[in-house]
Image (cartoon, helix red, strand yellow):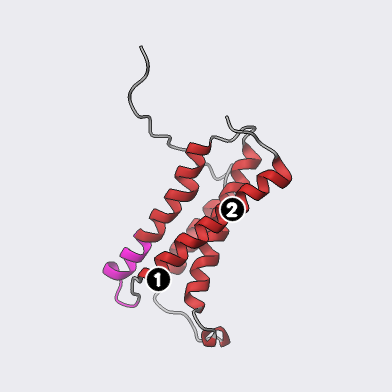
Amino acid sequence: MPNTHFSFPIPHFSFRKYPLSLCCLLLIGVLSFAPFFPETPLNRVKFIDKWTHFIMYGGTCSVIWWEYLRQHAAIDYHKLLLWAVVGMIILGGLVELGQAYLTTTRSGEWLDFLADSVGVLLGTLVGLLQNYCFFKRSAS
């Protein structure tokens, strides 16, 4: 009889296998809820906050891809897309909600969430390029 139940793929995130990914995720958490940032010359750059979100989420997503490809002989695209793409986009939404409702010094913004999501999509393209150029892993 065929298996008809949905199995939710929970990854085994160990610090040994995914140290950079976990550090990036921790950094996103700390920076997203820090109560203040000092003034810098970059504050004059238009949309610097959105560029920061874009780079943090895109960079983290590409690091997740790189560490996954480094650790696995074949790609499980369902698992990788669930955690590296959908999971990162959900994280971006939860962070924005947390900033809006759990802090008094930060605000949640739709454009920040959009920048997070676009960054994740670009990070996924970078991950696919990493596989094509360096790892050449096939689907499992």
| Residue topped by disc 1 | 111
The one nearer the camera, 1 or 15, is 1
The magenta region covers 94-105
Query: Counting other residues with Cα less than 10 Å from the Cα at mark 1, is it few (<14), some (14-19), or many (20 or more)?
Result: some
Question: What distance separates the C-alpha of mark 2 from that of mark 1?
Answer: 21 Å
State the image coordinates of residue 87 (x, y, percent, origin top left).
43, 49
Is 1 left or right of 74, judged from the image as shown?
left
Regarding residue 12, the answer to whether it shows in the image is: no
Q: Position of residue 114 (x, y in %)?
A: 42, 65
Q: Secondary structure at mark 1?
A: helix
In magenta stretch: residue 84: no
Q: Is residue 116 left or right of residue 136?
A: left
Front-lying residue, 38 or 6: 6
- Res. 28 in view: yes
Based on the displayed image, in which of its 4 quarters is residue 96 positioned?
bottom left
Quadrant containing the C terminus in the rendered view: top right
What amino acid type is highlighted by mark number 2? Leu
Image quarter of residue 90: bottom left
Q: Secondary structure at mark 2?
A: helix
Q: What's the amino acid at mark 1?
A: Leu
**For marks 2 and 1 on the same chain, the one whose residue lies earlier in the sequence:** 1
Residue 133 drawn above or below residue 123: above
* Residue indicated by mark 2: 125
Residue drawn at (35%, 29%), measured in percent from left and top?
A: 6
Asked if the stretch drawn in magenta spans residue 96, the answer is yes
Measured as percent of width and height from the top left, residue 92 is found at 41, 60
**Outermost residue, left side:** 101
